[in-house]
Amino acid sequence: MTRLRVVAAQELRDLWLTGRGLPLILAYAVLLSVTSYLVASNRALNFLEQREAVGLTLQVGVGVAALLVLVVAADAISGERERGTLESLLLTPAPRWVLLAGKGLAAMSLWLVAYVVSVPYVWYLARGTGVLGRALVAGLGVGTLIVLFLCSLGLAISTVTGSNRVALSVSFFLLLAAFFPTQLPTAAQSGGVADVLLRVDPVTAGLHYLSELVVRGRPAGEDLGWLVGPIVLAVAAAAAACTVGARMSLRPGRRA
């Protein structure tokens, strides 16, 4: 654990003091400001529409934060390999999965900062609706599961690819594939097979749970079945990323 803390602390410094952390969060805040302004500028909002505005802001916040984390995770190893700095990183006296986990924790810090940034927007839109508390708690929990899954996916892809461009391209493709079911017509989401696919996809299932909880006001425990997929896949993806990270090498495809 001591080595993990040291690696994570170094990666956090690199990300926030000399890296892309602050510019990415600034861009995130601007996008969230525009989204909040657009949904709040409609003065004809009724009670239900306010809840929809809160749900939309949460979904945008989670989706964009997941994208930012994925970008950083996909660059974690392939970027080091492409810049020629991976060799010095592998010489550090720490297991290779610890190096990957440290980079993952640094990437996940983007989500935590993004969540804190989103709180004032959610609070403003949720005034008088009675859903502020559940929106903030559910947003943090569901968002963490989705972001952990995509972060682990990005780290694994970054480890096994030799080009940063390839790692980003594959990661973006998988991100689009994960978000695609959320855009399907309602009629296409009905049926046994379709329901299973929607529940398995962690992004679709997580955002559906948020919508049911915040917009429709359903009890928190009534739709917990939708969180089984996100929980299982987030844990499995994290374990897979650490397993792949343990075999990290200067050139992908070769044993360490």
Image (cartoon, rainbow, N blue to C red):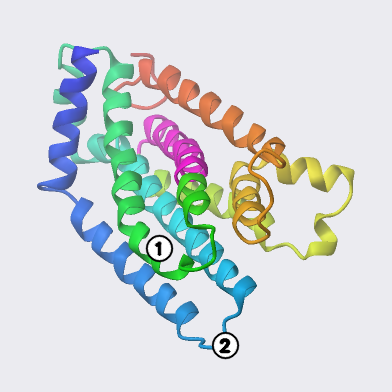
Disc 1 packing (10 Å; few <14; some 14–19; many ≥20): some
On screen, residue 58 above or below 145:
below
Residue 129 in view, yes or no: yes
- Magenta stretch: dominant SS? helix
- Residue 111 in the figure: left or right of residue 241: left
Which one is in front, 83 or 36?
A: 36
Which comes sooner in the sequence, label 2 or label 1? 2
On screen, residue 59 above or below 107:
below
Q: Which numbered circle lies on residue 2?
A: none
Residue 164 in view, yes or no: no
Which one is in front, 243 or 88?
A: 243
- Residue 140 in the figure: left or right of residue 206: left
Q: Say what amino acid the circle numbered 2 marks.
A: Ala
State the extent of the magenta-drawn residues as a range: 140-162
Which quarter of the picture shows residue 122? bottom left
* Circle 1: element type: helix
* Circle 2: element type: loop
- Residue 238 in the figure: left or right of residue 1: right
Distance Cα–Cα, label 2 vs label 1: 19 Å
Check the picture and name the quadrant holding the N terminus.
top left
Q: Say what amino acid the circle numbered 1 marks.
A: Trp
Residue 254 on the magenta segment: no
**Where is mark 2, residue-wise?**
44
Q: Where is residue 55 in the image (x, y as percent from the top left)?
A: 55, 62
**Where is mark 1, residue-wise?**
123
Which one is in front, 134 or 87?
A: 134
Disc 2 packing (10 Å; few <14; some 14–19; many ≥20): few
Identify which residue is drawn at 20% across, 21% down.
5
Q: Which residue lies furthest to the left in this view?
A: 17
Q: Where is residue 136 in the image (x, y as percent from the top left)?
A: 45, 51
On screen, residue 242 above or below 190:
above
Residue 158 on the magenta segment: yes
